[in-house]
Image (cartoon, grey):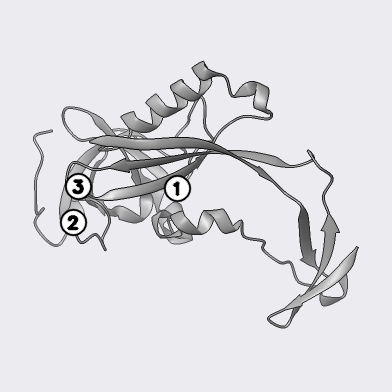
Amino acid sequence: MGKVSIAESEFESEVVSRGEQVTFRLVVEYETPSGDEFVERSTLAADSRSDLTTEAVSAALTEWADERDVAAVSGFSVVEEQLARRGGEAPDTGDEALLVDPSDRETKSERTTEEAVARSSRYVEGDHLLYYEGGPDSTVYGHTTEGIVAEAPPIEHQHRENEPDKIRLDVGKRTKIVPLEWVIGHADEADEPIDKPRDL
């Protein structure tokens, strides 16, 4: 074990035994109906390769696609991530360090803030919410629309990890999982009219 210094912080660097900490991620490249192309990662609820049967991967892909506006899928892969080293701030500093998985940086913009998660405790099934389609910074969508809460956080999955930062909304003919940071709040409390109302 050695020490690593970075940005005025010092960490103990520990070698992780092979097979001690393995994560399996589903990586899907797809196109939306508007023609935008995305690559999205999600963590699979699997402990070993033996869990990744054709049926399990197919079910995970089906569940993933059902929750998104997908026009076409270009391809997918299941990536095995093996942790090789890990570090925490050295004990003499007295502070805790947060280690970030580099592969998660791709989806950082989709993650909700702590304030959004805290605010979600006010949302219950049946609530009428206003949210940004595609997120507030979307150059393709970005307009406000509405939905009825069908499942409050955390969103539970059978083949993937649960999502505490998402909410499932009934948007008319189907349900849709929306990141909490896209949710503005209750529709009856909004100061502005809804850009694109739905027939709910």
Q: Is residue 169 visible?
A: no
| Above-or-below relation of 51 to 38 | above
Q: Nearer the viewer, mark 1 or mark 2?
A: 2
Name the element at disc 2. Answer: loop
Left or right of residue 150: residue 140: left
User: Callout 1: 10 Å neighbours few (<14), some, many (20+)?
Assistant: many
x and y percent of residue 53 in the render? 57, 19
User: Callout 2: 10 Å neighbours few (<14), some, many (20+)?
Assistant: few
What residue is shown with label 2?
140
Q: Earlier in the sequence, mark 1 or mark 2?
A: 2
- Give me the C-alpha separation between circle 1 and circle 2: 23 Å
- Tag 3 and tag 1, C-beta contact below 8 Å: no
- Give me the C-alpha separation between circle 2 and circle 3: 10 Å
Identify the residue at image location x=34%, y=31%.
65
- Give me the C-alpha separation between circle 3 and circle 1: 26 Å
State the mark number for residue 35. Answer: 3
- Considering the image in quadrants, where does the N terminus appear? bottom right
Left or right of residue 168: residue 4: right
Front residue of this view, candidates 187 and 137: 137
Three-letter amino acid code at disc 2? Val
- Tag 1 and tag 2, C-beta contact below 8 Å: no
Identify the residue at image location x=15%, y=56%.
143
Quadrant hosting residue 168: top left
Name the element at disc 3. Answer: loop
What residue is shown with label 1?
165
State the mark number for residue 61. Answer: none
Quadrant hosting residue 181: bottom left
Q: Is residue 154 visible?
A: yes
Identify the residue at image location x=58%, y=31%.
45
User: Callout 3: 10 Å neighbours few (<14), some, many (20+)?
Assistant: few
